[in-house]
Amino acid sequence: MKIIKLSCISLLSACLFAPVLSQAGSYDDAVKDANSSIDKAKAVNYEWRDSRKMLKKADGLNKAGKSDEAIKLVEKAKKQGELAVAQAELQSGVNGPH
């Protein structure tokens, strides 16, 4: 009887914590992607001012249990990195005022 109760408790615990654990992995993956995107922008000297600040804020939100808001902010930071690289490419052929 104890084994059945213990098995039920284990199964219930696994079901309850599975979404939390899977979201933690997706958050970490999203942060890695965003950092990669921002690093590419930095490599072409076009890193935007607030991109890394967004990641710090997202980390605080994630630690506070606001993972949905945190992931949205991480995605925004990633997009800034991508846009910065695109901006660098567009402006690479532009000369300053003559």
Image: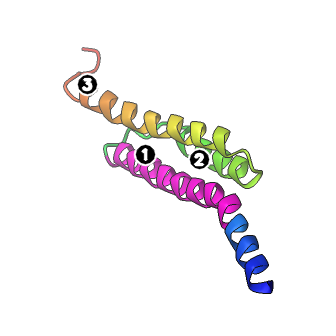
Q: Say if mark 1 contacts mark 2, CB within 8 Å.
A: yes
Q: Residue at x 59, y 47 (%)?
A: 55
Residue named by callout 1: 38
Residue named by callout 2: 55
Q: Position of residue 77 (x, y in %)?
A: 51, 39
Q: Which mark is residue 90?
A: 3
* Coloration mode: rainbow
Q: Which mark is residue 69?
A: none
Residue numbers of the magenta segment: 14-43
Q: Say if mark 2 contacts mark 3, CB within 8 Å.
A: no
Tell us which disc is closer to us: 2 or 3: 2
The amino acid type, in three-letter code, at marker 2 is Leu
Which quadrant would the C terminus be assigned to in this image?
Answer: top left
The amino acid type, in three-letter code, at marker 1 is Ile
24, 5: nearer the viewer:
5
The amino acid type, in three-letter code, at marker 3 is Leu
Farthest residue, direction top? 98
- Going from the N terminus, do you reach mark 1 or mark 2 first? 1
73, 83: nearer the viewer:
73
Q: Position of residue 25 (x, y in %)?
A: 53, 59
Compute the Cα span from label 1 to label 2.
10 Å
Q: Residue at x 51, y 38 (%)?
A: 75
Quick check: is 31 in the magenta stretch? Answer: yes
Relative to 3, residue 64 above or below: above
Q: Residue at x 67, y 45 (%)?
A: 57
Which quadrant would the N terminus be assigned to in this image?
Answer: bottom right
Farthest residue, direction bottom? 2
Tell us which disc is closer to us: 1 or 3: 1
Helix, strand or loop at disc 3?
helix
Relative to 63, residue 47 above or below: above
Quick check: is 19 in the magenta stretch? Answer: yes
